[in-house]
């Protein structure tokens, strides 16, 4: 069964409060009980003090100081708060008692007389508090004076108090639960608004945001987090859309060239030189498409974590080999320089690092003049390995430095100078570097050259 959040909050708070109220009500009842009993006991004490000097047992006979007072109404009738008196000998045999006791006797407990302590008992239909003191004559212990006071009124008061508290308890709990449920409902109202707004947001209106009601509380923070998440989602979706449209565009251009070339060819018979030339154009369009598809696949493959296994790699040997190999392939002067006196070890995936290096060296070759030299450097900075690939080629405009790692981004100058490329190389480099935890940065000046730098993490 699903319980609404506000009911759960109200339920838990009510449970805790119910325990606290139970304790409070219990304490109220106990304090009232204690106060009432103490007050009766005090009165009993006073009463017993009043009578103890007026009664003497002389040779087993009772003698009163003021017998007339003993005949008073208060000891003869059952009044509102009657006082019951009985005099007993040492064995507890009744010698005399107040008429209001009728045929009843008070209880005889000699052990309680020394401490002058009171206790509750029933006499007939009456509940009373009784006290008892020894009676002496000329230093001789001759009997006991038993004195009791009705507890009926106090009992009634205590019973009423208990009934009121017991009736109040469920009422208080119910009103507490309802009040807390209402307040909890009010407090989660902003969350309901967030839920309803986020439910309305789909791919088609991802630009909408949840309105911020209270900027500084937790709900404000939640709203901000949801809005930031939406922002990231929107940006990622836009990037994806851009990527798809760029990829289609990149493939459509060589396809159109291919189609145009073939259409021209079939229009009428051509000389074999013309066929050769047009087929050559068609082939380079196909090459361009293949290169784009290969790089798209490289991006996709990397996403599946193909290069995730890492092994220990010594950079000096690795870079020397790759520089030599690339120098031969590209027919360019590529110099390798080691700035560390000791071997430089990194934990990386060799294939991945090879792909990064190939892309960066290829770019350095493409975007610099054929006579210029390319420098590959490695070393340790604060104990951490780095690699730099420096060229003194065309350089990159400062406003493009951030964007060169975006898929399909190419500087207009590269397009205008008909330098072959798809704009995917650095996107692949960035993804591979991220996968290996390598930080990649670039410093460049237009017309002066560029340096791509890789900083390796602690291995
Ligand atoms: P591509 O080289 O296929 O165009 P990249 O992703 O490798 O794609 O590079 C993106 C863009 O960054 C290039 O088009 C170019 O404008 C610029 N770029 C990359 N490397 C260099 C470099 N070494 N010198 C100058 N510009 C560069």
Image (cartoon, helix red, strand yellow):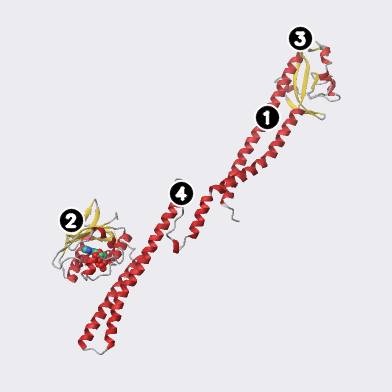
Pointer 2 residue? 339
- Spatial CA span between label 4 and label 3: 89 Å
The numbered disc on residue 138 is 3
Q: Select label 1 or label 4 by which is in front.
A: 4
Residues 418 and 426: in front is 418
Residue placed at 24% from the left, 80% from the top?
A: 281
Is there CB contact under 8 Å for labels 1 and 4? no
Within 10 Å of the Cα at label 3, are there few (<14), some (14-19), or many (20+) other Cα atoms? few
Q: Decide which of tag 3 and tag 1 comes sooner along the chain.
A: 1
The N terminus lies in quadrant: bottom right
Where residue 448 sits, quadrant-wise, is: bottom left
The numbered disc on residue 338 is none
Where residue 82 sits, quadrant-wise, is: top right
- Spatial CA span between label 2 and label 3: 120 Å
Q: Secondary structure at mark 1?
A: helix
Locate residue 429, reporting x and y percent: 28, 63
Q: Decide which of tag 2 and tag 3 comes sooner along the chain.
A: 3
Can you say whether 261 is above or below 171 in the image? below
Within 10 Å of the Cα at label 2, are there few (<14), some (14-19), or many (20+) other Cα atoms? some
Locate residue 349, reporting x and y percent: 30, 63
Q: Select label 3 or label 1 by which is in front.
A: 1
Q: Select label 4 or label 3 by which is in front.
A: 4
Q: Select label 2 or label 4 by which is in front.
A: 4
Locate residue 22, reporting x and y percent: 64, 38
Q: Is residue 200 left or right of residue 55?
A: left
Residues 357 and 58: in front is 357
The C terminus lies in quadrant: bottom left
Q: Select label 2 or label 3 by which is in front.
A: 2
The answer to whether any part of residue 39 appears in the image is: yes
Pointer 1 residue? 32
The numbered disc on residue 220 is 4
Q: Decide which of tag 4 and tag 3 comes sooner along the chain.
A: 3
């Amino acid at each position: 069964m699903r319980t609404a959040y506000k009911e759960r909050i109200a339920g838990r708070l009510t449970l805790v409060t119910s325990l606290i109220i139970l304790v409070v009500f219990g304490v109220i009842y106990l304090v009232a009980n204690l106060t009432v009993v103490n007050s009766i006991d005090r009165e009993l004490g006073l009463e017993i003090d009043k009578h103890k000097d007026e009664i003497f047992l002389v040779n087993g006979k009772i003698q009163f100081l003021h017998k007339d007072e003993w005949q008073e109404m208060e000891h003869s009738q059952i009044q509102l708060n009657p006082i019951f008196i009985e005099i007993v000998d040492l064995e507890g045999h009744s010698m005399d008692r107040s008429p209001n006791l009728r045929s009843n006797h008070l209880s005889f407990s000699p052990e309680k007389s020394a401490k002058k302590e009171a206790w509750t008992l029933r006499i007939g239909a009456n509940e009373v508090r009784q006290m008892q003191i020894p009676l002496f004559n000329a230093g001789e212990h001759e009997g006991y004076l038993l004195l009791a006071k009705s507890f009926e009124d106090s009992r009634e008061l205590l019973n009423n108090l208990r009934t009121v508290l017991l009736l109040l308890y469920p009422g208080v709990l119910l009103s507490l639960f309802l009040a807390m449920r209402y307040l909890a409902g009010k407090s989660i109202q902003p969350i309901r608004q967030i839920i309803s707004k986020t439910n309305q947001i789909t791919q088609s209106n991802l630009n909408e945001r949840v309105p911020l009601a209270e900027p500084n509380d937790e709900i404000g923070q939640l709203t901000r987090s949801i809005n930031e998440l939406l922002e990231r989602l929107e940006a990622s979706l836009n990037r994806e859309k851009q990527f798809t449209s760029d990829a289609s565009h990149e493939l459509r251009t060589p396809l159109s060239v291919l189609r145009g070339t073939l259409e021209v060819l079939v229009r009428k018979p051509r000389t074999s030189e013309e066929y050769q030339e047009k087929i050559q154009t068609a082939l380079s369009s196909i090459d361009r498409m293949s290169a784009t598809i290969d790089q798209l696949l490289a991006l996709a493959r990397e996403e599946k974590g193909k290069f995730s296994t890492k092994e220990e790699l010594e950079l000096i040997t690795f870079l020397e080999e790759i520089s030599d190999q690339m120098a031969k392939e590209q027919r360019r002067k590529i110099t390798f320089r080691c700035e560390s006196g000791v071997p430089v070890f990194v934990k990386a995936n060799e294939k991945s690092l090879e792909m990064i290096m190939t892309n960066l060296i290829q770019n350095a070759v493409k975007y610099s003049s054929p006579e210029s030299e390319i420098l590959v450097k490695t070393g340790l900075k604060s104990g951490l390995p780095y690699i730099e690939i420096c060229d003194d080629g065309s350089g990159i405009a400062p406003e493009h430095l951030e964007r060169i790692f975006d898929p399909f981004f190419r500087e207009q100058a590269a397009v205008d100078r008909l330098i072959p490329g798809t704009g995917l190389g650095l996107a692949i480099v960035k993804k591979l570097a991220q996968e290996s935890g390598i930080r990649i940065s670039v410093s460049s000046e237009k017309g002066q050259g560029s340096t791509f730098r890789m900083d390796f993490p602690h291995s």
